[in-house]
Image (cartoon, rainbow, N blue to C red):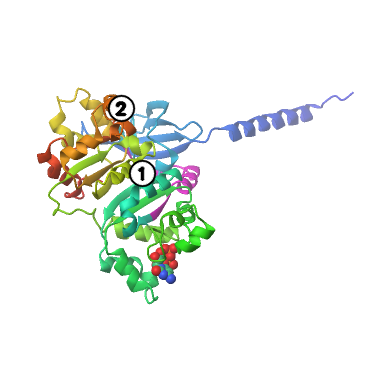
Amino acid sequence: MFYPSRTSLFGFVVFFAGLYFVERNTMEEEKFAISVEWYDEISSLVRPFILFYYPSDRTVEMYDSKQKKTFLKRSFCETVSEIDLYIGNKVSVFGRELKLIEYLDEVTRNELTRKSERTYAMLKPEVIPKMGKILSFIEGKGFKFNRMMLTKISATRAAEFYKEHLGRPFYEKLVNYISSGPVLAMELLAPSAVRYWRINLGPTDPVVARSDAPNTVRGLFGTDTTYNAAHGSDSPEAAARELNLIFNNLSSHYESSYTIKTLCLVKPHVLQEGKLGALITAIQENKFKISSVKLQRMTLTDADQFFLAYKGVWDDYPAQIKHYSSGPSVALSIDADVNAFREFVGSFDPNTAGKLQPSSLRARFGYDTIHNAIHCTDLPDDGAREVEFFFKDVGSLH
Ligand code: CDP
Ligand code: MG
């Protein structure tokens, strides 16, 4: 018979306790911790919190750093995902805009910087009339749009943008082409975004792309080496340089010479559902010209300021305003008669639109009065003012 001695018994206990401890630790749920700030618009105070994010079930929790207690119990929040969690970004947690300040541990830093890499992507002038289709392609690959604007790059800026190619035979032609018309500038987010976008962009020459990688942007939408549809940064360093050059130095394209204008504001739910490209395609296929594009994050105050005239008119006004502040929205300026575009957008309630105007935008992309896809200008006299709210006063919204 084996009778364990007291020391071996002690050894067993220590061994199993250790196993239990290791097991508990390896089973501990992954949790990211980020310090955030919430600007409380009512009290005009900045309040510090810790935001916890649990990737396994995509829930969030908020801890009040000042009061030292839990502020929001762990709950699912559809407006926050891992890819949004990078320093400097703002996320909306149940209507509260939180600015991300700092990763609070190594695991959070390593995991999240890998998951939300950024790259610079740009649609070149020749594909602007079919940008909706390319945006759908990008959404279908799982990229998130973080910044986006239709802009014009001057020849001097284009020369700077492509300076690595200075002296190459195609340089001048390339610079002239890029500065010949508006381009759609985008900051895309995805895990390993730089490499992932290059793969989806395809080879530089669309003819090669069509034979070697047909299901790429250049394979599907490119013509030749000059007109090759889109650009993609070739390293994270290049992405940082290009993003800075474009987004911190240029503004969104706006032409005051168009006298007939209407605003089409694409609501946050359309972007969250990955349908921005499809909606823009519908507009472009109906021969409405989109002359400006800009993605912005509206605060409650921005939305309240813009929609003030509807206070007391819409019975769901507070919920409408809240939806506009729940995530990025995209403003489009359409060179069209306000009434003609309104008819294409359809009735305010998508259920009515579904019955009366089944091919309207709200019938196709909306499902209730809050999630009705679009705000469009109501009165012809308001067109220019509404468009200018988003495009003229650059810097007021971001
Ligand atoms: O854009 P990508 O990074 O694939 O190619 P690149 O070698 O960095 O060249 C930049 C751009 O210059 C290309 O996208 C082409 O539009 C243009 N190019 C050209 O016109 N002729 C060449 N032989 C090479 C590039
Ligand atoms: Mg390149």
Q: Indicate the quadrant where residue 286 lies.
A: top left
Image coordinates of residue 204 in percent, x first then y, are: 45, 63
Describe residue 51's horizontal placement relative to residue 390 as left or right: right
Image coordinates of residue 73 in percent, x first then y, are: 41, 25
Q: Which residue is mark 1?
A: 277
Q: Amino acid at mark 2?
A: Gly
Q: Which residue is mark 2?
A: 354
Q: Nearer the viewer, residue 188 or 270?
A: 270
Q: Nearer the viewer, residue 334 or 51?
A: 334
Image coordinates of residue 85 in percent, x first then y, are: 40, 42
Quadrant observed for ligand 1 in the rendered image:
bottom left
Quadrant in the picture for the N terminus: top right
Image coordinates of residue 84 in percent, x first then y, are: 39, 42
Q: Nearer the viewer, residue 114 or 234?
A: 234
Tell me how far mark 2 sits from mark 1, CA to CA: 21 Å
Q: Taking the image as drawn, is residue 294 in sight?
A: yes
Describe residue 200's horizontal placement relative to residue 385 as left or right: right
Residue range in magenta is 98-120
Q: Residues within 10 Å of mark 2 (few under 14, many from 20)?
A: some
